[in-house]
Image (tube, rainbow, N blue to C red):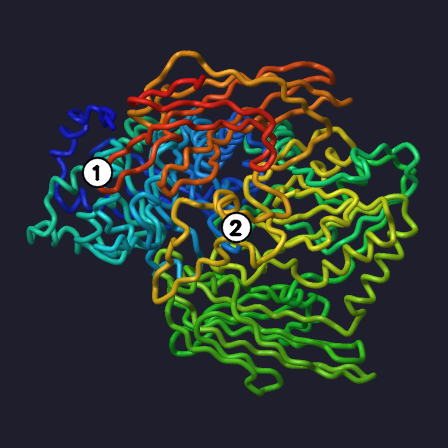
């Protein structure tokens, strides 16, 4: 593989000559949580970074700042549309400039290796080609408007369990063909301006190295073989060494200003452990990034309009609607025709509280959110009655205590009082807030050592009340003077990395309340957590639920409402307890009693539409009973409008599954990715996702690539480009490959959009290869009865395998089949290709 030419560094190297070692090293650690250091002598302004897989979160300087909340990456991937992905990347760039952000920490091109992965929603797909193709489009959109992308997490970082410690064990062929493949593709096709090294590491049988120290992958492969000229950024607080990470290929330690580099790295250079030329190379890479984003020799870009434009809201709505997958519609219920509908029952825990985005660093405080109820109410005629019924709570954790129950013991007003104490116990400040949610509270002076929360909890309803307390770090919780919970965790940064700061362990107690009510004095003694670049904070949560109806009573009420309605729409799914950065799921079942709810509603009304509001696969044991079934993902802020557009036929749900939906948990090829003795073993090899389902002959609930849409398609013919092409590809972005022309007709009664999918079936010559692998795709649209042509490029690289003995790519000779169809399990046309003497030929 030829190495791309690197930028001419002569002029930048001349600048560096005027900088001493300490000044250069200072540039290699963040100035704070999000910003890089400036250096006037180099003409370098501070570069600002921000999280961004589901929208640009910002820097947190303004605690009230909001932003555009896009559908999760999996929802975008479900559209299988590079143009749409590029448009969303452009929107992210506009949003970044609105917030003064230069580099967005996205896209994420790790693979959905197991459905229980906590960040599954944040990834595009289980397939390397689909992931790489769509991620490259997002990068092109971002960078076309001068905002840098940071491709992450390099590499094989597919689990949240012990995510900062484990090592991934996989052979070289699997690494090259599967997990490095989307990185290589995006780097070649879109040239992202930075790459993030993962928390985890790699165990290749000869070395077990943290990714921030992995010289073979960072220095030799990424920068050497692939010619990447930008900086390699650490994941936040991932760097644990000085010389090893510096020599290994890391360029920037985040966050700052503290960390393992700084003075220690300068000392390592003076001691001869790190060559100063290595330092110069790192600074040059940062200068390349700064030049790309306009932070070198240029004034800071003027902020764009502070208010999102209407077309930005429309794009988010379009992505959410077009990514929706119609899994089943046996009763031809969809789209709904409002004529004749007098009443609609909207049912389900996620109908009441939609899950719009996954938890963790991807979280964006949305500028607005449109609930499913709001979207349907706005779309339905005024004379249609819409009722909403929860049908039971799907969350394991209780809701936060209502402000109406909390009384500040000093003022008698509503709320919880916080007293800020120094190390000697002197009160140096405080405030009162009307909430039981003090998650990652940092509103105190720098000398604060303790935060004492006090409130009086008034319970009036007779019966059994449930209280839950959750805190992080070192703390004590007392109720009426008696300690009920304590902790002594002093780990600091690790609390953030494992998400204990936002998802603390809970302890619950029952409180009996008589007819006269009960008043309880609550005190929480919290030691300030010192979390390095993440700041200083305390975490406390007070949750409560009164006596009330049981889930079964709520389900019965919902079923009765469904029976009385013309149409029932049931929205079920996951929530913030289930899908989040920081932890993996423990299973695939819908939380709570949602399966029972769906079955009861289906039995009550044959015109029931089930909507699944989840980012990652969940088991749907009632799928074959549902008259109509839609998958709506984590749809972002325009959720309600997008669902209404789909249900009422305004936008076709033209999405296709970017992963395989299992019917049974025991069929899942990789049921979990929990480390064993610190190792996550990739025993499935190259058979990731749908490839493993095909290898094992298993039948999923719905296969990879499945989706129905509003119309039917007839596949007429497929032809291959007649000219033989090289089977050896110099780079993943090279033009070498086969061009397929597919003729198809919209044979239904509605206009529609089709995703033409091509799967490669290699010869079974004794080499362990997938039964089928995705080789290309194209999206087309046509009016009813119209014939349309899809042009699909099948790159030569999909024919290749990595030869570990030769440390090189090769293309085994033989006859290959190309299956053209609507999913990995629905082929409609077949063509054959011969590989001979390093050339690809249409077979005759």
Q: Which residue is drawn at 82% across and 54% down?
A: 601
> What residue does disc 1 label?
806
Pick whichever of labels 2 and 1 is earlier in the sequence: 2
Question: Is residue 89 in view from this perspective?
Answer: yes
Tell me: 121 left or right of 280: right
Looking at the rendered structure, the secondary structure element under dot 2 is loop
Tell me: 7 left or right of 388: left
* Position of residue 126 measured from the top left corner of the image (x, y, whole percent): 49, 43
Q: Which residue is drawn at 46% across and 37% down?
A: 131
> What residue does disc 2 label?
63
Q: Which residue is drawn at 57% across and 26% down?
A: 756
The residue carrying pointer 2 sits among few (fewer than 14), some (14 to 19) or many (20 or more) residues within 10 Å by Cα, namely few
* Position of residue 556 measured from the top left corner of the image (x, y, whole percent): 85, 62
Q: In which quarter of the image is residue 716?
A: top right
Q: Residue at x 57, y 68 (%)?
A: 541
827 and 65: which one is in front? 827
117 and 6: which one is in front? 117
Q: Compared with residue 466, is residue 192 higher up or lower down, i.e. above or below?
A: above
Tell me: 613 left or right of 202: right
| CA–CA distance in space, label 2 to label 1 | 55 Å
240 and 764: which one is in front? 764
Question: Is residue 70 in view from this perspective?
Answer: no
* Position of residue 542 measured from the top left corner of the image (x, y, whole percent): 61, 70
Please identify the residue farthest to the bottom as the structure is shown: 482
Looking at the rendered structure, the secondary structure element under dot 1 is loop
């Amino acid at each position: 593989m030829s190495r791309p030419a690197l930028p001419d560094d002569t002029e930048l190297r001349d600048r560096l000559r005027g900088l001493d070692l300490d000044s250069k090293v200072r540039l290699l650690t963040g100035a704070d949580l999000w910003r890089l250091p400036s250096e006037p002598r180099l003409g370098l302004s501070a570069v600002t970074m921000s999280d961004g897989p589901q929208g640009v979160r910002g820097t947190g300087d303004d605690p009230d700042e909001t932003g555009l909340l896009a559908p999760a990456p999996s929802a975008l991937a479900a559209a299988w549309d590079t143009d749409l992905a590029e448009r969303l990347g452009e929107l992210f760039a506009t949003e970044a400039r609105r917030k003064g952000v230069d580099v967005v920490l996205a896209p994420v091109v790790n693979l959905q290796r197991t459905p229980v992965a906590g960040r599954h929603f944040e990834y595009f797909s289980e397939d390397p080609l689909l992931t790489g193709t769509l991620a490259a489009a997002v990068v092109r959109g971002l960078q076309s408007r001068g905002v840098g992308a940071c491709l992450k997490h390099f590499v094989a970082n597919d689990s949240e369990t012990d995510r900062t410690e484990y090592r991934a064990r996989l052979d070289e062929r699997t690494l090259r063909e599967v997990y490095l493949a989307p990185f290589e593709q995006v780097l070649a096709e879109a040239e992202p301006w930075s790459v993030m090294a993962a928390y985890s590491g790699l165990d290749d049988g000869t070395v077990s190295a943290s990714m921030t120290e992995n010289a073979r992958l960072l220095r030799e492969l990424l920068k050497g073989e692939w010619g990447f000229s930008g900086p390699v950024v650490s994941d936040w607080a991932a760097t644990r060494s000085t010389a090893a990470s510096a020599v290994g290929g890391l360029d920037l330690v985040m966050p700052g200003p503290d960390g393992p580099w700084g003075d220690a790295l300068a000392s390592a250079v003076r001691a001869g452990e790190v060559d100063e030329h290595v330092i110069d190379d790192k600074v040059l890479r940062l200068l390349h990034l700064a030049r790309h984003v306009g932070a070198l020799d240029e004034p800071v870009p003027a902020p764009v309009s502070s208010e999102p434009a209407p077309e930005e809201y429309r794009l988010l709505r379009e992505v959410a609607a077009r990514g929706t997958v119609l899994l089943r519609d046996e009763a031809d219920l969809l789209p709904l025709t409002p004529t004749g509908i007098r009443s609609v029952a909207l049912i389900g825990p996620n109908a009441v509280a939609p899950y719009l985005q996954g938890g963790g660093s991807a979280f964006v405080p949305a500028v607005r959110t449109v609930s499913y109820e709001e979207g349907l109410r706005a779309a339905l005629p005024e004379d249609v009655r819409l009722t909403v019924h929860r049908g039971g709570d799907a969350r394991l954790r209780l809701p936060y205590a209502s402000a109406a129950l909390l009384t500040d013991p000093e003022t008698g007003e509503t709320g919880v009082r916080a007293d800020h104490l120094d190390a000697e116990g002197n009160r140096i400040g405080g405030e009162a807030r009307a909430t039981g949610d003090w998650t990652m509270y940092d509103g105190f002076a720098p000398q604060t050592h303790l935060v004492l929360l006090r409130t009086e909890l008034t319970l009036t309803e007779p019966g059994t009340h449930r209280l839950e307390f959750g805190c992080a770090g070192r703390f004590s919780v007392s109720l009426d003077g008696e300690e009920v919970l304590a902790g002594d965790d002093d780990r600091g940064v690790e609390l953030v990395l494992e998400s204990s700061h936002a998802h603390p362990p809970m302890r619950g107690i029952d409180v009996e309340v008589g007819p006269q009510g009960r008043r309880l004095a609550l005190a929480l003694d919290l030691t300030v957590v010192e979390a390095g670049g993440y700041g200083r904070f305390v975490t406390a949560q007070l949750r409560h639920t009164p006596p009330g109806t049981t889930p079964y009573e709520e389900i019965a009420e919902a079923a009765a409402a469904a029976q009385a309605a013309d149409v029932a729409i049931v929205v079920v799914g996951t929530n913030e307890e289930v899908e989040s950065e920081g932890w993996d799921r423990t299973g695939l079942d819908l939380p709570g009693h949602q399966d029972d709810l769906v079955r009861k509603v289906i039995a009550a009304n044959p015109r029931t539409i089930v909507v699944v509001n989840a980012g990652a696969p969940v088991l749907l044991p009632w799928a074959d009973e549902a008259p109509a079934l839609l998958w709506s993902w984590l749809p972002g802020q325009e959720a309600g409008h997008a669902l209404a557009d789909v249900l009422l036929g305004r936008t076709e749900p033209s999405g296709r599954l970017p992963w395989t939906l299992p019917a049974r948990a025991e069929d899942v090829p990789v049921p979990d990715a929990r480390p064993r003795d610190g190792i996550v073993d990739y025993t499935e090899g190259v058979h990731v996702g749908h490839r493993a389902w095909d290898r094992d002959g298993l039948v999923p609930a719905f296969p990879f690539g499945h989706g129905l849409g509003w119309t039917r398609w007839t596949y007429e013919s497929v032809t291959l480009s007649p000219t033989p092409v090289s089977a050896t590809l110099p780079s993943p972005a090279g033009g070498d490959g086969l061009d397929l022309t597919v003729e198809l007709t919209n044979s239904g009664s509605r206009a529609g959009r089709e995703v033409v999918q091509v799967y490669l079936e290699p010869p079974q010559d004794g080499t362990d290869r997938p039964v089928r692998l995705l080789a290309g795709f194209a999206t087309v649209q046509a009016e009813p009865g119209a014939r349309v042509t899809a042009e699909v490029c099948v790159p030569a690289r999909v024919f290749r395998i990595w030869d570990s003995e030769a440390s090189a790519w090769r293309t085994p000779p033989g006859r290959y089949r190309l299956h053209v169809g609507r999913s990995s399990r629905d082929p409609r046309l077949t063509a054959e290709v011969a590989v001979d003497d390093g050339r690809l030929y249409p077979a005759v």
